[in-house]
Image (tube, rainbow, N blue to C red):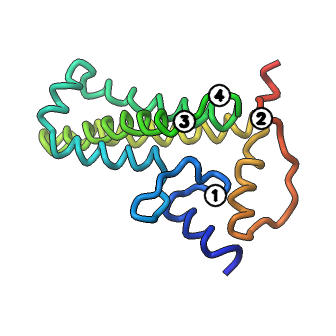
Amino acid sequence: MHGDQRSVWWMLLSHHAPGDLGRTWSVFGVRVCVRCLALAMFAIAALFFKSAVAAAFSPCGRWGVLLLTIPAWFDFSLGELWRTYPRTNLFRFLSGALFGCGLGCCLAFGLDAGDWLPLLGFAVVTALEELAVAFLFFFCGHLESYLEKYEEAVGLRTHSHSHGSDACPHDE
């Protein structure tokens, strides 16, 4: 196996390279991504408390809950591109919680009313946000350096990368 096995397991269970373990919490000795932990917790809670969640998010409507993905996307993108952006696990947890509530709402809509279109919309919006992040990182010259830390962690680094700046070069 390439690389340090411990690094590989941390990446598989937390999806963060060893240098980014500050973005994780230890749960029973396992490093877990803070944002993803909140997402899972709140999505499951939303399913258990469907009626309360439906009442809380009814002003948003079935499609308004898609907006709950935006804080996580915003926090991740700014945190990666501009290192001076204030990054805390509390905000990661809160943005993940909103994302999880949105996912839970869409799942609840599907289970209660048989309306799976909001869940499909949620999946499409999430995929489009992921593509937007990838294009933003590429456009700002940050994609290679972002991927490099993962390649190094598992011993897959096959070529040298130039390190980009922390700010988007197209901001000037």
Q: Is residue 143 above or below residue 67?
A: below
Q: CA distance from mark 2 to mark 4?
A: 11 Å
The residue carrying pointer 3 sits among few (fewer than 14), some (14 to 19) or many (20 or more) residues within 10 Å by Cα, namely few
Going by the numbered disc 4, the residue's amino acid type is Tyr
Which callout, 2 or 4, points at the residue further toward the start of the chain? 4
The residue carrying pointer 4 sits among few (fewer than 14), some (14 to 19) or many (20 or more) residues within 10 Å by Cα, namely few
Q: Is residue 9 left or right of residue 138?
A: left
* Image marks 1 and 3: residues in contact by CB distance under 8 Å: no
Q: Residue at x 54, y 35 (%)?
A: 88
The residue carrying pointer 2 sits among few (fewer than 14), some (14 to 19) or many (20 or more) residues within 10 Å by Cα, namely some
Going by the numbered disc 1, the residue's amino acid type is Ala
Which residue in the protein does label 4 denote? 85
Q: CA distance from mark 1 to mark 2?
A: 18 Å
Q: CA distance from mark 1 to mark 4?
A: 20 Å
Which residue in the protein does label 3 denote? 88
Which residue in the protein does label 1 denote? 17
* Image marks 2 and 4: residues in contact by CB distance under 8 Å: no
Q: CA distance from mark 3 to mark 2?
A: 18 Å
Which callout, 3 or 2, points at the residue further toward the start of the chain? 3
